[in-house]
Amino acid sequence: MPEPPPIEAHVDLRDFPWMPLDVQRVRASTTAQQSGDAFRAAVLLWCAAWHEVPAGSLPNSEKLIAGMAGYHVQNGHLPDEWLAIREAALRGFKQHSDGRLYHRVIVTKAIEAWGHKQGREAEKLKAKKQRDQARERQRRRRERQRQQEQNQ
């Protein structure tokens, strides 16, 4: 039986235009040693997985994945070029119990980014709360001043 997904289902990084890249790890990887087409397709799939929900995953659809890698179905068939590099391009992706394919390294980076995003959102909420409280104090001050002026 497949393992449960390695990341929470709601993790959404579609508003992140960037993805961290561990340059040394990529350059030393087996993926980097593949053909240029396979490497290009792998990088496109990493990028696609970054903007999927949950982040770090791909749908388990051969046609969708091929399209994400730049190889589109022709006459109802997957291109031979895709089939030739498919295994190399999908290296590191593993199917989990929700049926989606997850890449361990992309998921790890996504979890880190999600933590930063949550921290920023918490800071924004705290700042908004402080602004709202300051506005409320100001409103009460003005209200007291008006009442004092009316009582004089």
Image: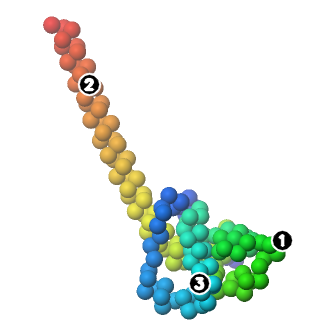
CA–CA distance between discs 3 and 2?
Answer: 63 Å
Q: Which residue position holds label 3?
A: 39
Question: Which mark, by number, is residue 140?
Answer: 2
Location of residue 66 by image quarter: bottom right
Q: Amino acid at mark 3?
A: Phe
Tell me the SS state at disc 2. helix
Between 108 and 8, the residue placed more toward the observer is: 108
106 to the left or right of 146: right
Residue at screen point 44% across, 66% down: 113
Residue 16 percent location from the top left of the image: 48, 61
Q: Secondary structure at mark 1?
A: loop
Of badges 3 and 2, nearer the viewer stands 3
Q: Earlier in the sequence, mark 1 or mark 3?
A: 3
Residue in the foreground of this view, choosing between 57 and 86: 86
Residue 138 spot, x, y in % from top left: 25, 29
Left or right for 31, reference 126: right
Dot 1 or dot 2, earlier in sequence:
1
Residue at the extreme left: 152
Point out residue 114 in the picture as x, y percentages from the top left corner: 46, 63
**Residue 31 vertical placement versus 151 (above, below):** below
- Find disc 1 in the rendering and name its residue: 76
Residue 100 in sight in this render = no
Asked where in the image residue 88 lies, by quadrant, the reply is bottom right
